[in-house]
Amino acid sequence: MFKKILYPTDFSDVSKKALDYIKQLKESGTKEVVVLHVIDEREIEHISHIPEINITEEELEKRKEENAKEEMSPIVTELKKSGFAVKTRIEKGIPFRDILKVEEEEKVSVVVIGSHGKSCIAEMLLGSVSEKVIRKSSKPVLVVRR
Amino acid sequence: MFKKILYPTDFSDVSKKALDYIKQLKESGTKEVVVLHVIDEREIEHISHIPEINITEEELEKRKEENAKEEMSPIVTELKKSGFAVKTRIEKGIPFRDILKVEEEEKVSVVVIGSHGKSCIAEMLLGSVSEKVIRKSSKPVLVVRR
């Protein structure tokens, strides 16, 4: 029921809080955690087209990927130390869509996600990534708060 | 972290499925479950004002309360058998508001709720009770699917 967790993270504080809940779920039978970060392709495209910013899409994507790997490393260490099998995935796409895609691909039992991500104002206007995941997920979702 | 669960139920199938998750959370430290049913005061008022239906608000409320008590009884038995302390509450009001109110009053650690209730069409138009709870809750929410 809680055997395999999908943990999508944008490395925000509330995402990090979700980690504590994952660790607690171990007692309820969690064996494996899939840590997922989605690089927002719309952001990449948008920023690389701002004339004042001299960066190509490729370069920005590469930097984002490197940053994601760096951010993921302590998370993986922490989860492994708690006794979980850990898999990491870095995807490029639309966050909520890729979260749902990976949820299916990895056949997870449950999703543990922060209630709000980093892009607070956009989320207030458009609905948060987590709200979209909750609405469309075929699996139970544990929403952790700030 | 999962010590005291608020379990709001409208006795729908997905609500009943949420029970299985609650039982599984015992291993993660759940001691007590507050089972809550909110009688929708708007529905009471609406139905009692349909001229073809010959029932007073008071009588309808009484019947709804009796029905809720009957529906709650096997849930309480099941939870007690699983070793939880159980408290039941039947409230009359607006479901999502009363769920949030009881969440505060009972100082629960987490809310476990079905993704959709019985009133599917209204929920598709207006957003489900669970969506409103998720958005406004100050506690983590585990959303269980059909």
Image (spheres, coloured by chain):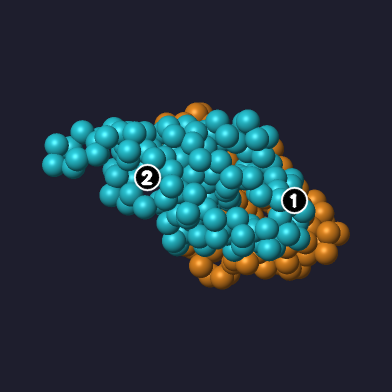
Chain colours: A orange, B cyan
Corner quadrant of residue A82: bottom right
Residue B74 versus residue B35 in the image, above or below: below
Image coordinates of residue B85 in percent, x first then y, are 71, 51
Image coordinates of residue A37 in percent, x first then y, are 61, 53
Q: Label 1 is found on which chain of the structure?
A: B
Give the side of residue B60 with respect to residue A67, left or right.
left
Mark 1 on the same chain as mark 2: yes
Q: Which residue lies furthest to the left in this view?
A: B52
The residue mark sitting in front, 1 or 2, is 2
In the picture, which quadrant includes the C terminus of chain B?
A: bottom left
Q: Residue at point 21% right, 33% down?
A: B49
Q: Name the residue under label 2.
A: B63
In primary-sequence order, the first of circles 1 and 2 is 1
Residue B90 versus residue A38 in the image, above or below: above
Corner quadrant of residue B41: top left
SS assignment at label 1: loop
Q: Name the residue under label 1.
A: B31
Q: Label 2 is found on which chain of the structure?
A: B
In the picture, which quadrant includes the N terminus of chain B?
A: top right
Kindly tell me whether residue A45 is visible in this rendering. no
Residue B18 or B61: which is nearer the viewer?
B61
Q: Residue at point 42% right, 56% down?
A: B12
Mark 1 is surrounded, within 10 Å at the Cα level, by few (under 14), some (14 to 19) or many (20 or more) other residues, namely: some
Image coordinates of residue B42 in percent, x first then y, are 32, 33
Q: How far apart are marks 1 and 2 (CA)?
A: 32 Å
Q: Residue furthest right?
A: A81
Q: Residue at point 55% right, 31% down?
A: B101
Q: Check disc 1 and give the amino acid type.
A: Lys
Give the side of residue A131 with respect to residue A6, left or right.
left
Kindly tell me whether residue B92 is visible in this rendering. yes
